Image (cartoon, grey):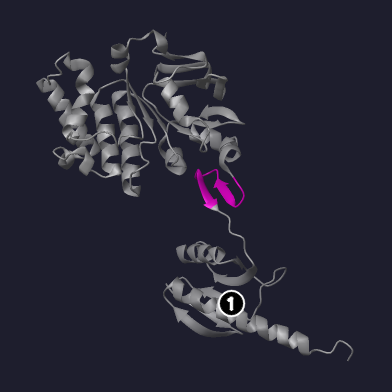
């Protein structure tokens, strides 16, 4: 494993007439060959600006970016095109070209002045279309494709460019859920199989934590933190960067979940290790009810109890008697609120009729 890109005290941003607009500063990090690294951070943290700076699309304000041991500013554009391919989010301006022609543009650093494709170039274009799974899109004009399909074409173009480094800005932004997973796994396999450096910015936090070899966490206040997802989970970095109110992070699985606010407790009986119990508890929490084992120390009423026996049914027990037995959680939930309300109102009425002076 070797270092392909290194940031040395880098500051990113824009040069303006009134002075520099600094987006991020003091950035020090390394990207290695054979690894897929995901850049994560909130909107406005400077992810796209950093990626464009690494690609030499805009200059650093201070510090430097080294590519293969040389300052990126020392490379001629053709040299850099053979080392680094870039996929940006906005590709809507490409029209009147087929998907295959766009992918073939990835071979331009090798085809010379006239851009004539050799047999080797044609084979690489075909392979790239196949790897991304868009062979059927090859004859289609770019303006006839969906945003997600255009994004896949641009990723295939980057692969066809055969560079040791691929930089991608939000490559899964327009893709449906299965395509997001497939694309991230493909990029990870390319990094491993072909010893490429894959660096991508993304908002797909949980996918990145499951697939990436390394992650970079970027934030205006917290700066840049880098490491393996598992290490950053253990040391609490991921929570510090992303956890907000009503969000819980499970360090073991590297996943976030929503913490619902509940208005009342409800007794739920059954085996807690069953899928039915766990998912029913989740549905209750989403609807403002917290499952508890007993009424002691809670605001739960013993008048209404849910039983989950583990036989595929859900049962509502009212005052010790089974009144509802269903196979769908949705049917149970439709009955719970009226049942709770009925006994809650009954308790209020009883309390109102009591005479405290008797």
Q: Quadrant of the N terminus?
A: top left
Q: Residues within 10 Å of mark 1 (few under 14, many from 20)?
A: many
In the image, taking residue 84 as reference, residue 139 lies left or right, namely left
Q: Residue furthest front?
A: 17
Give the camera-side residue of 23 and 318.
23
Identify the image quadrant of residue 183.
Answer: top left
* Residue 279 percent coordinates (x, y): 48, 63
Pick out the residue farthest to the right: 357
Tag 1 secondary structure: strand
Q: Residue at x 58, y 49 (%)?
A: 248
Q: Is residue 267 left or right of residue 214?
A: right
**x and y, in percent, of residue 209 in the image:** 46, 39
Q: Quadrant of residue 144?
A: top left
Reply above or below: 1 against 139: above
Residue shown at 37% from the left, 21% from the top: 33
Q: Residue at x 53, y 75 (%)?
A: 307
Residue 180 picture location, percent across and down: 34, 43
Which portion, as a residue range, is magenta?
244-257
Position of 227 compared to 105: left or right? right
x and y percent of residue 278 in the render? 50, 62
Res 311 visible? no
Is residue 342 at all visible to an observer of this figure? yes
Kindly identify which residue carries mark 1.
305
**Quadrant where the C terminus is found in the figure:** bottom right
Question: Residue reaching furthest left?
Answer: 119
Q: Which of the pair 180/75 is nearer the observer?
A: 75
Task: Say whether residue 67 is magenta.
Answer: no
Image height check: is 61 above or below 324? Answer: above
The answer to whether 164 appears left or right of 10 in the picture is left
Count of numbered labels shown in the rendering: 1
């Amino acid at each position: 494993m070797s270092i392909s890109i290194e940031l040395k005290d880098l500051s990113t941003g824009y040069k303006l007439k009134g002075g520099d607009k600094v987006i991020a500063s003091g950035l020090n990090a390394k990207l290695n060959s054979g690894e897929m690294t995901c850049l994560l951070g909130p909107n406005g943290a400077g992810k796209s600006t950093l990626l464009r700076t690494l690609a030499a699309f805009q200059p650093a304000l201070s510090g430097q970016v080294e590519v293969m041991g040389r300052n990126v500013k020392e490379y001629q554009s053709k040299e850099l095109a053979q080392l680094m391919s870039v996929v940006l989010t906005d590709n809507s301006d490409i029209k009147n070209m087929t998907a295959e022609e766009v992918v073939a543009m990835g071979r331009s650093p090798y085809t010379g002045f006239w851009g004539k494709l050799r047999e080797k170039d044609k084979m690489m274009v075909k392979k790239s279309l196949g790897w991304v799974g868009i062979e059927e899109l090859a004859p289609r004009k770019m303006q006839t494709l969906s945003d997600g399909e255009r994004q896949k074409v641009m990723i295939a173009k980057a692969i066809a460019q055969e560079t040791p480094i691929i930089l991608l800005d939000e490559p899964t932004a327009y893709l449906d859920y299965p395509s997001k997973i497939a694309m991230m796994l493909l990029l990870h396999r390319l990094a491993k199989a072909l010893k490429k450096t894959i660096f991508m910015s993304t908002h797909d936090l949980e996918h990145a934590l499951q697939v990436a070899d390394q992650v970079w966490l970027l934030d205006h206040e917290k700066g840049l933190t880098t490491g393996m997802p598992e290490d950053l989970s253990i040391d609490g970095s991921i929570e510090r960067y992303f956890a907000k109110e009503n969000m819980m992070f499970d360090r073991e699985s590297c996943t976030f979940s929503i913490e619902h606010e509940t208005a009342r407790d409800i007794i739920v009986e059954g085996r807690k290790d069953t899928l039915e119990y766990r998912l029913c508890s989740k549905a209750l929490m989403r609807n403002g009810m917290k499952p508890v084992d007993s009424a002691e120390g809670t605001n739960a009423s013993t008048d209404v109890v849910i039983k989950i026996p583990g036989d595929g049914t859900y049962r509502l027990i009212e005052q010790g008697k089974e009144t509802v037995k269903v196979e769908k959680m949705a049917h149970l939930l439709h009955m719970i609120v009226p049942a709770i309300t009925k006994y809650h109102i009954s308790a209020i009425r009883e309390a109102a009729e009591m005479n405290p002076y008797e």
